[in-house]
């Protein structure tokens, strides 16, 4: 009898989880859970999933850590920004294959993000690698069976087999982010990411600022950590860009960890010895590892004691007095200005054992050899240096740099060869030749200056009117600068920032002219809009945009940073929007998949708030007059900002409408009263906004769309489906079921209300904002503009049977300025 009771107790403890005990299983099936005090242990006993409290904190977190390592080494945290206040936490796998972390009130404080449809028999399994995987079926070797994995959402630790970088097909970015403190695993201020600009490279950030750079991949290691071993690799192709490492010896374990203070640590241990060793990464060993410690166009050299800086050959300190007292941050500038006409005489100087400079503005080719690379550099006046892309097997591939070279250092050994471009005079070491050239240059300069002074004197004596005309022209330019209450940039600074307005930096082009991406020496990025000589716009549009947008401050309006007026150049400088414009995403077959419904609704709401500010809350009532998807820019978070105020008009006091003899705008977004009669008001922008809303919902352009059944434009197509109570059919097919139907229908109704034929029927933007928020009842929309119900006579009915009534666009615009 006693024996039976003992056996019964043993079986009870084996098959039932008791609170406060550690389980021996490595997985959860649908409906199963673990509580605080219980853990999942990987099959080999290497890693655990469970609840823990970091440091001196009493808060509870769900995390993953290695077993048999003291102190506890947590490598992943689920609810890092949503801690549990007590020991009531429960981790559960639901029937849809979603992991849910529940608190004592049975509320979800964290869940795994699974975008795919749920499948039968999901399993959550902890692997020896530390990867917590939700899959279906028993085989983990098939990547298609993985629904979610913790390796896709790193915290502060990079583990063997974990990818750091990008899935370019889905837009998923995997990056490290530090804890806030040793007691708080919430998102800290330090991150390690792969920067995709130019040739991809690994960069450490503090907030938005670069603090160090492991750099690009040279086939063996990153350029900032030459000679690194332990099976590292970096993959760069059309689908993925990522860095990872493996430990071939199964008795070894190791991670790369980012501490709350921003230090990069390599932690490793073995199964035979559970104590761990920590090694500082090269980037944190000395000040030469700090990003751009010596400024631009200079090399940092560390001899084991203190760092020193020296200018590259052909460059001189920007501020010699500061350089002489070891203040190097301003770096070096070219000793002689580039002269493209003599570029065929330029040559290259080889530096060895180098950390290659920042590659964010570089160009690369995997197929060129070193000779082809050199020739390619010589053909481009802005090219300043080149190197092999891959240093294995004698070297292959080509990396080119343009203009400024940043974050170079010299290693006592290792590193790689790097070639900088120099003029023939800089390559020539004959001192006397340099002195002779300097004497000749001074003589020529003095002669030319004397001739200019003589000509000016003759002009003043013989033709005082012409001299006064020259003076007045310069004086007017000065007055223009003084009238503009904005920072002014010199043209040379902007030319350098945009690499002489290189086509590779061109972001796009509108009616005003091309827009270029620029980067100042301090790393700040700009969008530079340059008036085109072929543009139909000019000084008036330039002054109009400066006068209006410089006085506007709103999170949904693009910020004007400054301007430039030099000679014929009229340039506007804006904050740089890394995600381009809305049309770049919403009309692209692949990129529009990155805009889920929640983000599209946020964009619709953000544009509405920006327009409300323009129409009602700003000091002047402003009518944009050219609102369209290409004039809605997206910042790094895909938040919308209204841009391009060259055609905008301001109203004073109670003025609400006006007329113009010059109709300028974009076909497909202009309301009927403006296109036909030049009449514009705040309701003109409302119409344009309605078109944008319908385009965002559908992913289709109003101007290019044609209803296959009725040949309607997008407005007519939306109206037909609305009247037939099939508004949900307008939804972009890539969104599938990932949306809130009531929000979609509300947006379609708001869009149709905004594009009604009569301006007085359209709502104002304050009503639109309330409608979108669900705080105002929506009236029934009337027929949209540019839509006419087809008249079908009885005779036609007899001859055509019973045709479907369709919409046609019967309006033509004769006064139109392309944008």
Image: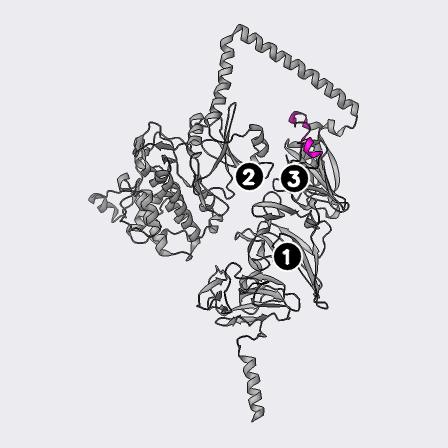
- Indicate whether 463 appears above or below 761: above
**Residue at numbered disc 1:** 257
The residue that appears at 33% across and 46% down in the rendered structure is 768
Q: Residue furthest bottom?
A: 1
Of callouts 2 and 1, the N-terminal one: 1
Q: Residues within 10 Å of mark 3 (few under 14, many from 20)?
A: many
Counting from the top left corner in percent of width and height, residue 498 is at 57, 34
Of callouts 1 and 3, the N-terminal one: 1
Over which residues does the magenta segment extend? 321-343
Residue 500 shows up from this direction: no
At mark 1, the secondary structure is strand
Q: CA distance from mark 3 to mark 2?
A: 15 Å
- Indicate whether 354 appears above or below 135: above
Counting from the top left corner in percent of width and height, residue 66 is at 63, 66
Counting from the top left corner in percent of width and height, residue 679 is at 30, 32
Q: Would residue 175 be found to the left or right of residue 509 on screen?
A: right
């Amino acid at each position: 009898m006693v024996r039976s009771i003992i056996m019964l107790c043993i079986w009870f403890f084996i098959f039932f989880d008791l609170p406060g005990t550690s389980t021996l299983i490595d997985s959860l099936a649908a409906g199963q859970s673990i509580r605080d005090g219980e853990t999942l242990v990987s099959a080999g006993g290497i890693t655990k999933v469970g609840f823990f409290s970091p440091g001196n904190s009493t808060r509870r977190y769900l995390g993953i850590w290695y077993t048999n390592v003291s102190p506890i080494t947590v490598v992943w945290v689920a609810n890092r920004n949503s801690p549990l206040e007590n020991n009531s936490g429960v981790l559960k796998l639901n029937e849809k294959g979603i992991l849910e972390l529940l608190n004592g009130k049975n509320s979800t404080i964290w869940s795994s993000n699974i975008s795919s449809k749920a499948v039968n028999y999901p399993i959550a399994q902890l692997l020896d690698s530390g990867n917590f995987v939700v899959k279906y079926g028993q085989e983990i070797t098939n990547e298609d069976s993985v629904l979610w994995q913790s390796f896709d959402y790193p915290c502060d630790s990079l583990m063997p087999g974990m990818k750091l970088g990008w899935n370019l097909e889905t837009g998923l970015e995997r990056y490290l982010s530090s804890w806030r403190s040793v007691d708080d695993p919430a998102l800290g201020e330090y991150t390690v990411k792969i920067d995709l600009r130019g040739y991809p490279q690994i960069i450490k950030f503090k907030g938005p600022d670069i603090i160090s750079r492991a750099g690009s991949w040279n086939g063996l290691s990153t350029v900032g950590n030459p000679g690194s071993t332990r099976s590292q690799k970096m993959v760069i192709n059309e689908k993925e860009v990522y860095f990872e490492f493996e430990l071939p010896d199964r008795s070894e374990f190791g991670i790369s960890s980012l501490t709350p203070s921003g230090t990069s640590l390599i932690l490793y241990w073995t199964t035979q010895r559970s104590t761990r060793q920590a090694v500082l990464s090269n980037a944190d060993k000395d000040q030469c590892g700090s990003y751009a410690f010596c400024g631009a166009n200079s090399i940092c050299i560390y001899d084991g004691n203190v760092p020193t800086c020296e200018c590259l050959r052909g460059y001189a300190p920007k501020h010699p007095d500061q350089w002489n007292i070891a203040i190097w941050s301003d770096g070096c500038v070219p000793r002689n200005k580039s002269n493209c006409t003599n570029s065929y005489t330029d040559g290259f100087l080889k530096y060895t054992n180098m950390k290659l400079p920042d590659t964010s503005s570089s160009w690369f080719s995997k197929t060129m050899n070193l000779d082809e690379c050199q020739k390619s550099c010589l053909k481009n006046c802005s090219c300043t240096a080149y190197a092999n892309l891959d240093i294995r097997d004698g070297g292959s591939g080509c990396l080119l740099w343009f203009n400024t070279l940043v974050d170079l250092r010299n290693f006592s050994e290792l590193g790689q060869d790097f070639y900088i471009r120099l003029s023939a005079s800089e390559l020539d070491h004959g001192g006397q030749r340099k002195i002779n050239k300097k004497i000749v240059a001074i003589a020529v300069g003095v002669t030319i200056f004397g001739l200019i002074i003589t000509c000016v004197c003759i002009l003043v004596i013989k033709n005082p009117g012409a001299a006064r005309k020259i003076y007045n022209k310069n004086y007017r330019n000065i007055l223009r600068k003084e009238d503009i209450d904005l920072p002014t940039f010199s043209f040379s600074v902007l030319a350098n920032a945009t690499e002489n307005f290189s086509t590779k930096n061109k972001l796009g082009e509108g009616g005003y002219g091309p827009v270029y991406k620029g980067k100042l020496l301090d790393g700040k990025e700009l969008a530079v809009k340059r008036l085109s000589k072929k543009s139909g716009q000019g000084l008036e549009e330039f002054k109009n945009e400066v006068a209006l947008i410089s006085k506007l401050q709103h999170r949904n309006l693009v910020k004007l940073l400054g301007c430039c007026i030099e000679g014929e150049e009229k340039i506007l400088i804006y904050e740089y929007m890394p995600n381009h414009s809305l049309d770049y995403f919403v009309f692209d077959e692949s990129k529009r998949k990155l805009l889920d419904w929640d983000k599209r609704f946020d964009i619709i709401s953000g544009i509405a708030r920006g327009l409300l500010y323009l129409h009602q809350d700003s000091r002047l009532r402003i009518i944009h007059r050219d609102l369209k998807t290409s004039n809605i820019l997206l910042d790094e978070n895909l938040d919308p900002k209204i841009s391009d105020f060259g055609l905008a008009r301001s109203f004073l006091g109670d003025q609400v409408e006006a007329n113009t003899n010059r109709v300028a705008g974009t076909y497909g977004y202009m309301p009927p009263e403006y296109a036909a009669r030049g009449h514009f008001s705040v309701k003109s922008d409302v119409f344009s906004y309605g078109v944008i809303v319908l385009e965002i919902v559908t992913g289709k352009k109003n101007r290019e769309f044609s209803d296959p059944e009725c040949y309607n434009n997008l407005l007519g197509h939306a109206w037909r489906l609305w009247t037939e109570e099939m508004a949900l059919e307008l939804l972009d097919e890539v969104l599938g079921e990932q949306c809130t139907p009531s929000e979609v229908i509300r947006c379609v109704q708001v869009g149709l209300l905004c594009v009604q034929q009569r301006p007085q029927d359209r709502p104002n933007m304050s009503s639109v904002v309330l409608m979108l928020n669900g705080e105002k009842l929506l009236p029934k929309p009337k027929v949209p503009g540019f839509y006419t119900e087809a008249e079908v006579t009885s005779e036609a009915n007899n001859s055509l049977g019973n045709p479907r009534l369709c919409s046609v666009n019967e309006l033509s615009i004769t006064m139109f300025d392309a944008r």
